[in-house]
Amino acid sequence: MEEFRGRTAVITGGGGGIGRALAVAFAREGMNVVIGEIDMDAAAGTVAAVEEHGVRAIAVQNDVSDRASMQALADATHDAFGGCHVLCNNAGVVTFKLAQDMTEDDWDWVLGVDLYGVIYGIQAFLPGMVAAGEGGHIVNTASIAGLVAPATPGISSYSTAKYGVVGISEALALDLEPHNIGVSVLCPGGVRSRIVEAGRNRPDEYGGPEDPIREMLPGESVPQEMLEPEDLAQKVLNAIRGNHLYVVSHPETQPSVEARFQRILDAYDLIPS
C-alpha cells in the first residue's frame, strides 16, 4: 500500500504511546483517523493532535477484549468514513507476575486484550476490507516478547499473547495476499509509553485497578534502550509502503532472537538418524 491520502486508519489504544504516534503519523500522510480507546480523555487529546494536520478524526469508546465493542468500532468507522484501509490492532496491557503467582483474572485480562483484541479486530474489520476490494494493510502490535520469551522477567501472560500475535500475523499475510491486503507485526523492544501503568484501567471484573510496577522482577532480560513512539511510527509507515511483515526496532535484541532460533535448529540434530 503506497497511497495514504484520503484513506482511513483505525487505531485501537490510540490515546497515547505507540497508538497516538501512529495516529499523528497517518494524519501527516493525509489519512483520516479513528481512535478506539477505553480512556476517552486520552482519545480526545489524540483527536485534537490529528486534526491539527487538516484531516478528520473521531474517537470511539472501545474495549478490544469485547467482540461486540470491536464490531461497534467497525460500524462507527463505516458510518463516518465508509470503511477502513489501515487497521492497527495496537491496544495492549501487561501485568508483572511470575507464572506460579498469576490468577485466572490475570491471565484472562492480559490474553483478552493482547490476543483476543487482535482476533476481534480482524473479525470486525477484515470482511469489509476484503469486500471493498481496495486493498489495505493490517498492523498488529506484538513485542520483542513475541519473539524471545525471556525478553523481560515476569511477563509470561504477555509473552504468550504476543507469540500468538506473531503467529496470527504470519498466517494472515498468506491468507490476504490475493486481496492486496498487507500485514505487518510490530516486535519492538522498549518503547516510551505507559503500558507499565496499564493496570490503572484494569476492569473490576478482572480484579480492578492495580498499582503500576515500581521495579522489575529479578531475572535476566534482553538489554534494550527506550525508543520514542514517533520513531517506531515511522518504521510502521515504511513497513506498510514496502509490505514488510516484520517490524523490529532494537538492533541489540538481534543476538537473543538468533540464539532462540539456533536452539530450535539444534534440536533437529537430536532427531535419531
Image (cartoon, rainbow, N blue to C red):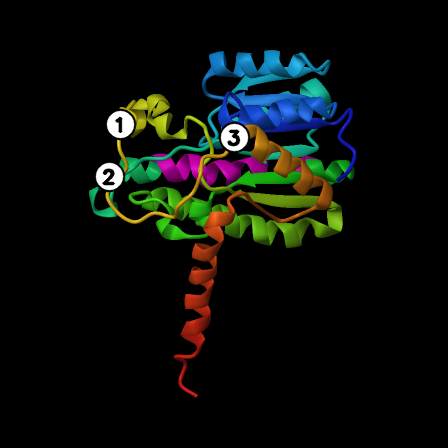
In the rendered view of the protein, which quadrant contains the C terminus? bottom left
Q: Secondary structure at mark 2?
A: loop
Tag nearer the camera, 2 or 3: 3
Q: Are marks 1 and 3 in contact (CB under 8 Å)?
A: no
First in residue order: circle 2 vs circle 3: 2
Residue 92, placed above or below residue 82: below
Residue 126, placed above or below residue 264: above
Q: On the image, numbered disc 3 is attached to which residue?
A: 228
Q: Are marks 2 and 3 in contact (CB under 8 Å)?
A: no
**Segment tinted magenta in the rendering:** 109-128
Q: Secondary structure at mark 1?
A: loop
Q: Residue at x 60, y 11 (%)?
A: 48
Q: Residue at x 40, y 85 (%)?
A: 272
Of the residues shown, which amino acid type is indicated by label 2? Thr
Of the residues shown, which amino acid type is indicated by label 3? Glu
Q: Which mark is residue 103?
A: 2
Q: Tell whether position 172 is magenta.
A: no
In the picture, residue 10 is in which quadrant?
top right
